[in-house]
Image (cartoon, grey):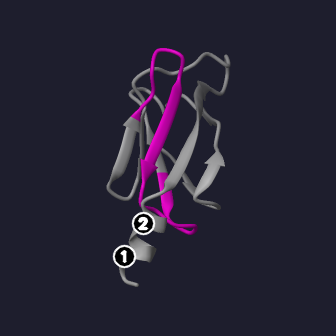
Amino acid sequence: MIAIPLILSACSNIQGVVRDRGTGTPIPSALVQINKDSASTDALGHYQILGSFLPGDTMMINAPGYNIYTKTVKSTNEIVDIDLSKKQ
């Protein structure tokens, strides 16, 4: 019975696109992290994180030249598109 929660929690999946808030341009190489699970965006700003995280965990997006963005995870399987603001 102990293995069942581990299997279920390992099936978390969040994906989306990270873009520049002002221009709508995709941001490549942004780091998207939830706990110890992370992914970098590709050339088109797409990312996918597969891991073991739960609703209520914090998602953090960080890209050079942009403000760090945080968001609370609402579901273990969702699409989250992010618009980052440039640092002033």
Give the secondary structure at mark 2: helix
Depth check: 22 or 33 in front? 33
Assess disc 2: are there few (<14), some (14-19) or many (≥20) residues with their C-alpha within 10 Å of its C-alpha.
few
Residue 13 pos. (x, y %) = 53, 49
Depth check: 85 or 38 in front? 38
Depth check: 74 or 21 in front? 74
Using the image, determine if residue 65 lies above or below residue 71.
above
| Residue at figure coordinates x 67%, y 16% from the top left | 23
Q: Looking at the image, do the residues carrying marks 2 and 1 touch, with CB atoms under 8 Å apart?
A: yes
Q: Mark 2 is on which residue type?
A: Ile
**Whole-number angstrom distance, CA of label 2 to CA of label 1:** 6 Å
Residue 81 pos. (x, y %) = 65, 37
Bounds of the magenta segment: 40-59
Q: Residue furthest bottom?
A: 1
Residue 36 pos. (x, y %) = 32, 56
* Residue that numbered label 2 is attached to: 7
User: Is residue 67 in view from this perspective?
Assistant: no
Instruction: Please indicate whether residue 74 sits to the left or right of residue 59 in the image.
Output: right
Residue 73 falls within the magenta-colored stretch: no
Residue 41 pos. (x, y %) = 45, 27
* Residue that numbered label 1 is attached to: 3
